[in-house]
Amino acid sequence: MDSYVSLSDENSPLLVDFHLPVSSSFAPHQSKIFMSVRRSLTNCQIVTIFCNIPSRFITDYNVDYEAEMTATLIILGCVGCFGYYLYYQFISRRRGYPNGPIPLPVIGNLHQIDFDAPHVTMANWKKIYGPVFTVWLPKANVVIADYSTLKEALIKQGDTFAGRYIGFVYGIFTRHAIDGTGIILSQKAGWQAQRRFSLHVFRNFGMGSNLMERKVMHQTWILIDHIKHEMNNNKSQVMNLELAISLCVGNIIHDLIMGRGFEYGDPKFTHFKHLIDSTLKQVASPQLLFIDTYPWLRFIIPGALGLTEYSKNGFAIQDFFLNEIEDHKKVLKLDSAPEDYIDCYLLEMARRRKAGEDMKHYDERTLAINVGDLWTGGMETTLTTLRWGILYLIRYPEVQAKVYREIRSELGTTPVCMADKARMPYMSATLNEIQRIINILPWNIQHSTLKDTVLSGHKIRQGTTIMAQIAAVHVDPDIFPEPFEFRPQRFLDKSGQLIKIEEFNPFGLGKRSCLGESLARMELFLIFTTLMQHFRFACVPGQVPTLKPIVGMTTVPRPYDCVVSLRNDNGH
Ligand code: HEM
């Protein structure tokens, strides 16, 4: 039968009464070590204060020096390990990185970041630590937060900073290939091949020229007709324009990549958009940043903090594109003229195969990933900027009135074309200001260094994750006074002409800058001008839509309704 030793102490309010078996299950020797540990702890004054360890039972035992020694070693070992852990977390791991806010063990600086406006947090840290500093998310990111240093890194040292950070969460869809796959999440030779090929295709399709302009205008007219149809002969109507604008922008990119579009009301489009929205929202969530740093957590936490859903949605998008590629293969003839991006890629693969050229960077999965990159890169950013644009002009009706006055004087009721842009500085300034204030990619997409280098006096090692904070520059009050005020005139000179502000770079800088910039600029100008030419947008009485965003990878407005009114030929 077991007998028990009581370790309780009636004088010790902090200790609950508990019993230790001292027979077979608890050997006397172990018990002595245990007691010795406690004795040693008791002798340590600080521990005594905190633990309020009873001394009565210690006197119950004769000192066993062997156990005492073991106990002391255990304590020293624990203290040593803990000391090393603190040294590693607060000193050692930060060596080799520029200074920055002190990271906590496990979570780094996550707790200090305003996830509604991460670029504002970065801009504030720049004031304390200078333009180059390290933030732990919970992995180390070297942040570059001022324009001249961004230029030094991304332009002067463009090749060194052209790598891409491909962590565990990003890498899921590229099968953790060491240098990634596709255009956005890849680096080195694979990235160069995909980017060069894609730019070539876009150029051939007339990105930035008339053919593309015609495609954009075609979808814009469908959008205008759709809104008028929804207004049902009323002069004004309360509407939520999100889906209609999504379909317009989505069909432009869809047409370019797959040679066709969706019909209004097609549930496949709504589902597809939902998959993209949720993937982009989740990828920059604190939960997935956590999993990115500690991927083993996915084996412990059910659902892995959203990772399961993120992967499921992402692979569903990829499967959709793989099916499209299969459909294209069925009808594509090797001697036919390509009609879209997928055709071009399949024909290039066939040509290379026939010519015995290197196929290393060309396969159908890479094509599916490229298509996904163009789709998400091309759709979400542009659509969201347009939604913000309408929202800001609802909140600033005086800006809307000026925009419309310029449209009336320069275009009247004639359809807009790209050549009109030079004559419409107020419209350009308004679009610039919308892009500046919303900062659609508040984290940007992280780069990585491809070799050891020095940036503004800081040694940066090869493989360091770099956050090029163009968004922090956009809220720098030295460049944009009162940066949180919406003020299109900051982009105009005294005579009302558009001025170029060098520090304004919503499409990024250098070798990894946005591949779709000219298409995006065209879409923003043509779609926005046409919408403003045909409709007036206003708040629903009693409902002022908020400017507070939902932030993930992109900054998205909260869903809003607005009153859409037809403009009449008299200019009202
Ligand atoms: C308002 C619209 C847009 C904005 C603000 C925008 C902004 C950006 C930014 C900031 C980057 C990252 C730059 C960097 O890594 O430093 C980027 C990359 C990229 N964008 Fe855009 N973008 C827009 C529209 C588009 C469109 C329409 C397309 C495609 C047709 C597109 C395709 C891409 C691709 C493929 C990349 C990756 C480039 C690379 O890694 O080499 N974007 N974009």
Image: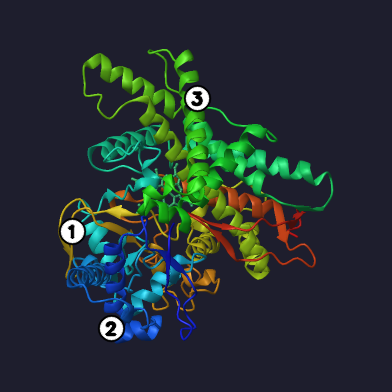
Q: Earlier in the sequence, mark 2 or mark 1?
A: 2
Front in this rendered view, residue 453 or 355: 453
Contact? badges 2 and 1 (CB < 8 Å): no
The answer to whether 263 is drawn above or below residue 561 in the figure is above
Identify which residue is drawn at 69% across, 64% down: 545
Question: Considering the numbered disc 3 on the image, is that residue within a helix, a strand or a loop?
Answer: helix
Question: Considering the numbered disc 2 on the image, is that residue within a helix, a strand or a loop?
Answer: loop
Which one is in front in this view, the residue at disc 3 or the one at disc 2?
2
Decide: few, some or many residues near mark 2? Use Cα within 10 Å; few <14, some 14-19, many ≥20.
few
Q: Give the x, y percent position of residue 375.
A: 48, 39
Q: Give the x, y percent position of residue 52.
A: 40, 83
Q: Earlier in the sequence, mark 3 or mark 1?
A: 3
Q: CA distance from mark 3 to mark 2?
A: 71 Å
The residue under label 3 is 324
Q: How is the image coloured?
A: rainbow
* Left or right of residue 572, residue 484 in this image: left
Instruction: Specify whether residue 542 is in view.
Output: yes
Which one is in front in this view, the residue at disc 2 or the one at disc 1?
2
Quadrant where the C terminus is found in the figure: bottom right
- Label number found at residue 461: 1
Amino acid, disc 3: Glu
Contact? badges 3 and 1 (CB < 8 Å): no
The answer to whether 331 is drawn above or below residue 287 in the figure is above
Q: CA distance from mark 3 to mark 1?
A: 41 Å
Snapshot quadrant of residue 358: top left
The residue under label 2 is 44
Front in this rendered view, residue 407 or 223: 223
Q: Is mark 3 within 8 Å of ligand 1?
A: no
Amino acid, disc 2: Cys
